[in-house]
Image (cartoon, rainbow, N blue to C red):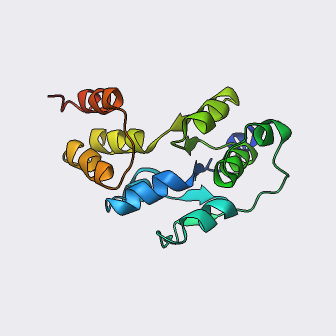
Amino acid sequence: MAKRNSANRDFGFVRPVVCNSSPLIGLEQIGKLSLLRELFGAIAVPPAVVTEVAPSVSLPRWIEQRALSQNIGPLILEASLGRGESEAISLALELDALLMILDDRPARRLAQSLSLPVVGTLGILLLAKRKHLLPALKPCLEELSRFDFRIAPALYEQVLEAAGESL
């Protein structure tokens, strides 16, 4: 795996946000996929993510498929992640991503160990609430739960508290 290239910041290029499948699917299911555009403008996804979301999400044009220019590195392959997570982490490294949107815990740990800034679906919803793009977070969490999006009870309460909506 090539070393992360920070030169793109020096030449004025915009650092992309890279997303994995589950946040795209979860946000689409609750009708909040457009929050990603409102927060970040555009999102980059690798081919495996496009394939994984195809049955349930019709990707808008502001979600851009980006092919990997390098093979997936051995450290990522050894992690035994899904193809989408592996490609998303590799793409984020290649593009020196500003942010990686990822829910799977082992994938998040690997991305963080590779110095990638990571946020999950709940973090995106919390950010949207803080930027006044959502009036309330709790209805979104309840809707995600109806779609079998797993949220640990402690995390559910922690996110609501951070949003100023705790019980």
Indicate whether 65 appears above or below 95: below
Kindly give the residue lying farthest to the front in the view shown.
148
Instruction: Give the residue displayed 20% in from the left and 30% down from the top.
Output: 164
Res 36 visible: yes
Residue 12 image offset from top left, x and y in percent: 66, 47
Q: Residue at x 39, y 62 (%)?
A: 28
17 vs 123: above or below:
below
The percent coordinates of residue 27 (x first, y second) are 39, 56
Q: Left or right of 40: which side holds 112? A: right
Task: Please tell me in which quadrant of the rendered image residue 93 appears.
Answer: top right
The answer to whether residue 158 is above or below residue 36 is above
Q: Is residue 130 left or right of residue 58?
A: left
Q: Nearer the viewer, residue 80 or 161?
A: 80
Q: Quadrant of residue 100?
A: top right
Total marks in image = 0
- The percent position of residue 160, horizontal first and vertical second, equals 25, 32
The extreme left residue here reads 167
The residue at 31%/31% (across/down) is: 153
Q: Quadrant of the N terminus?
A: top right
Q: Quadrant of the C terminus?
A: top left
Residue for point 27% across, 49% down: 140
Left or right of residue 75, residue 134 in this image? left
Between residue 153 and residue 127, name the one nearer to us: 153
x and y percent of residue 31 in the render?
Answer: 32, 62
Nearer to me, 39 or 101: 101
Q: Is residue 116 visible?
A: no
